[in-house]
Image (cartoon, rainbow, N blue to C red):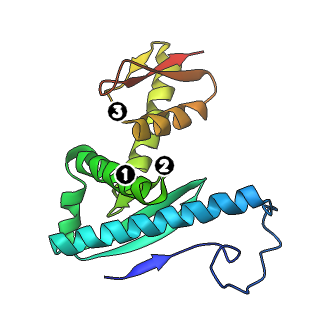
Amino acid sequence: MSETVQESPAVAEGSNAPANTDAPAESSPEASNTETLLVQEGDVAGDYLERLLDLLDYDGDIDLDVEAGRAVVSVDGGPDLEKLVGGRGQVLEALQELTRLAVQQDTGVRSRLMLDVSGWRAGRREELSDLGRSTAEEVLKTGQEARLRPMTPFERKIIHDAVAAIEGVYSESEGEEPSRKVVVFKS
């Protein structure tokens, strides 16, 4: 089992590396504290997931990163990991929530970390972006609104982003969880 941690040089403990001068200035104590907390969340999540993989006797490499203001934890490895994704990502969603709770218990702060197993979320993101674009183009062409099947908040956000990139259409979410869905309209 190996673990890779990616963090900015300014955040690494004991790092004497100079800060990247091409990067936007984030020297405020708040920005530094936020990134430090996100790195801490990733570390706690990585430890939790490593213990879980050991209990299940699954092989996996854990990669920790900070992207867009949230800790991102990826687990890659053997074929057993597909069981941690489940049908339509349902097991992955539950595992993400359990990992967030483990982080909250350790840090005292509610986590927004994103968990990916075997690249499932990355592949799903591409699939949903294509669906959002094609649905938006169809609505633009026919003028008729389109209702998509119920989706998770993660999935709906990707659809909304894809629709927003196409002029002449917009999207809204409707319904209550777990039946909340995206509806695409012509502007």
Badge 1 amino acid: Leu
Residue 82 in picture, x, y percent from top left:
21, 61
SS category of the residue bearing label 1? helix
Q: Compare marks 3 and 1 and give the one earlier in the sequence.
A: 1
Density class for disc 1 (Cα within 10 Å; few <14, some 14-19, many ≥20) is: some
Whether 94 is drawn above or below 187: the answer is: below
Residue shown at the point (66%, 85%) measured from the top left: 14
CA–CA distance between discs 3 and 2? 18 Å
Badge 2 amino acid: Arg
Question: Residue beneath label 3, please?
Answer: 151
Q: Toward which corner of the image does residue 11 lie, by quadrant?
A: bottom right
Q: Which mark is residue 18?
A: none
Question: Residue beneath label 1, please?
Answer: 101
Density class for disc 2 (Cα within 10 Å; few <14, some 14-19, many ≥20) is: some
Q: Nearer the viewer, residue 124 or 62?
A: 62
Q: Compare marks 2 and 1 and give the one earlier in the sequence.
A: 1
Image position of 105 (left or right of 54): right
Residue 59 in picture, x, y percent from top left:
24, 77
Residue furthest top in the image: 144
Residue shown at the point (71%, 75%) measured from the top left: 10
Disc nearest the viewer among 3 and 2: 2
Can residue 118 be seen here? The reply is yes
Question: Residue beneath label 2, please?
Answer: 112
Residue shown at the point (46%, 42%) measured from the top left: 129
